Structures are given as C-alpha cells and as structure tokens.
Amino acid sequence: MDLSPFPADVGVAIVSHNNRGKIGATLASLDRAGCAQEQMLVVDVASTDGLADWLRTAYPRVSVRRMASNDGPNPGRNLALRESPYPFVFLMDSDVQVRPDTVQRLHAAMAADGTVKIGSPLVVHLDDADRIQYGGTRLHFICEAINPWMDRTLAERGLSPLDIGVASANGLLIDRNAAIEIGLFDERYFMGKDDGDFTHRMRVAGHRILELPEALVLHQSRPRSTWLFYYQIRNRWHFMLKNYELRTLITIAPCLLVHEPLQLLVLHIKGHGGAYWKAVAGVLAMLPSLPGDRALVRGIRKLPDGELLYADALIVRGDLAGGGIARAAKNSYERFLRGYWALARVVLK
C-alpha cells in the first residue's frame, strides 16, 4: 500500500524515563512512517541511562528537552504541548511503536471532522500484535476503567471507528489548542488516572475522542507494580471530587458506600492496607486546591456526567481477584452497578 506523506502539521513528542533500551525501536518506527527528525521531540524525564548523549549521536536532528526531576510523565507531556509549534501533537511513550500509517490515518480523520480533538489508535501488545491491550475504553461511574476489548483480537473488534470516553496516552494525536483550553494534564497525578483525567476533561468540554481500529500502536506492555496502588487510589478519589458534578457525587454515594469498604477490605487482605491509608492522607493534602480544580472543570463543561459515565465489567488485577467465589461475587456486584446506573442516568442527563 502506498503511504501518504507524514503530515507536515504534526509534531511528535516522546516522553521517556530510563528507557534508552526501547526508544531506539520507537524512533525507528517513526522513521518508517516518514516522520522527519525535525518534527520529533524527546522529553527526557531525569533519565540516568545516557539517553540524551545517545540521541545526540544517533538522532542529531531530534530536539531534546530534559526534566530535572521525575514527577511522572505529565510534566513532560505538558511541556511538549505548550511548546510545540505544530497544531497537532502525536504524544507517545518511549516503549511504543507506531505502524507506518497510524499517524496519517488519525490525522485524516481529525482533519475531516473538527469535533474530534483526540485521535486514538488501538493499543496492541508488541509480542502479540493481534491482541488488544486498550480498546473501546470508557469511564465507569465509580471511576474505574472500562476496557471491553482487553486481550481480545483485532478481528473480534472489527474495523468500525468508535467514539470513546477516555484513552490511553501510550499514543494519542491531540489538537494542541484544545488541550491547552482544558488545562492540559494534571501534573500532580504521577501515575494512575494521569491520562484518564486529561481525556475525560476533553469529553467534559464537549469534544470527541475517536478510536480508529486501523490505526495501531504496539506497546511493550508489562504488569504494573504494586507501588502504584497509592497513586491509583489517591488519584481516583481526587478525580471524582474534581471532575464529577455535585449531583453525580450525591447520586452515586450509596454505591461508593459499598465500593470503598470492599476496596479497603480486599487491599488489607492482600497486604496492601498501608497504601490505602497513605492514599487517604494524600487526597486530604490535595483538598485545599479542590475549589480551583472544580472551577476549572465547571468553566469548560459542555456535557453532563450522565452522558460521560457508564457501567460495565470492572477490571481487577489477577492477584486481587481471588477464586471462583470471588469472581461470582464480582459478577453480581457488576449487575447491581449496571442496574443502579440505568436509573441514575435518568436523573443526571
């Protein structure tokens, strides 16, 4: 197939922390896509693996910006979006590879429809490129990820474009002006909801996120470490307090009064109770900024929560899921949440 030229109005920004061993393949995939080095920016997040020196030799025309400390990927993502001279930025992680036509397909879709402000590829596993890691992603009303195509095949997913609710920042084509208008990425999140918060606010502002299944990125995926529990718990609570309408928080309170003790119980049984209580302290420390956070979201809001939140199967780590009885209880709990949300959406739309 003949490839269209790499779009001249797209800059590529790669955020990397100690990933020198993988970023070479990332850059090579951009070479194959026809992206000029002058269109690339690598944000080196306090790496200690010699990344900047290697880039000066191997990719001398690629711009490099270095972050003095590792505060997660979001400060680097924001630097790239603020400083890019291009109206579109393909933001990607340094353990991701693009197919030769991925960015071109996303760009064509966004150029054809100005309501689309994020073009999202399907994220597949590098070691099993027919199997999906992230696809059809949305946000559960209890602020957990919905990922219906996880570990299913591309053939099962099919080729239909899909409007999605949130998206993984493994690779995203972003309208730079829209990103700035919604307040960019939250630099306090480090990891956990770091991309979900940003993409959800894009939807709050009335913009579309379009997933194109023929646009693929390949991710060198690995299991997440348990040290992330603190950020995942803290950021989930802050996400709801920051982004949800007050009437939503009131409406879902009965479900949260069930969900939070369940989460607390499971984490303590599995030996992660300390992370839970550390997260409690962490979210309390963020409360002074909450009025300003909520004011930002109110200022950009075009859509109510009833149109943005869903209820579907929850993703639970295998080491926390338990056996057959626990899975049956999970299925019953999910049915309860679906039924509750079906009624709640009538109020919240």
Image: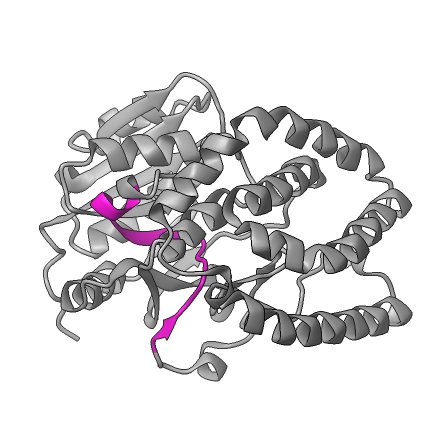
Q: Is residue 172 magenta?
A: yes
Tell whether 22 sits left or right of 62.
right
Q: Decide which of 10, 143 is in the foreground and name it.
A: 143
Count numbered badges in the picture: 0
Q: Is residue 229 above or below residue 9?
A: above
Q: Is residue 104 visible?
A: yes
Q: Is residue 19 visible?
A: no
Return the x and y of residue 219 as percentages of the image width and height.
Answer: 46, 55
Instruction: Determine the residue positioned at 28% across, 24% down.
Output: 65
Q: Decide which of 288, 57 is in the foreground and name it.
A: 288
Instruction: Determine the residue positioned at 30% across, 30% down.
Output: 79
Stretch of the chain drawn in magenta: 161-179
Return the x and y of residue 24 as percentages of the image width and height.
Answer: 34, 41
Q: Is the N terminus in the top left, top right, bottom left or bottom right quadrant?
A: bottom left
Return the x and y of residue 147 as percentages of the image width and height.
Answer: 56, 66
Q: Is residue 19 above or below residue 212?
A: above
Q: Quadrant of residue 19?
A: top left
Instruction: Determine the residue positioned at 69% across, 76% down.
Output: 339
Colouring rule applied to residues: one colour
Return the x and y of residue 25 as percentages of the image width and height.
Answer: 35, 47
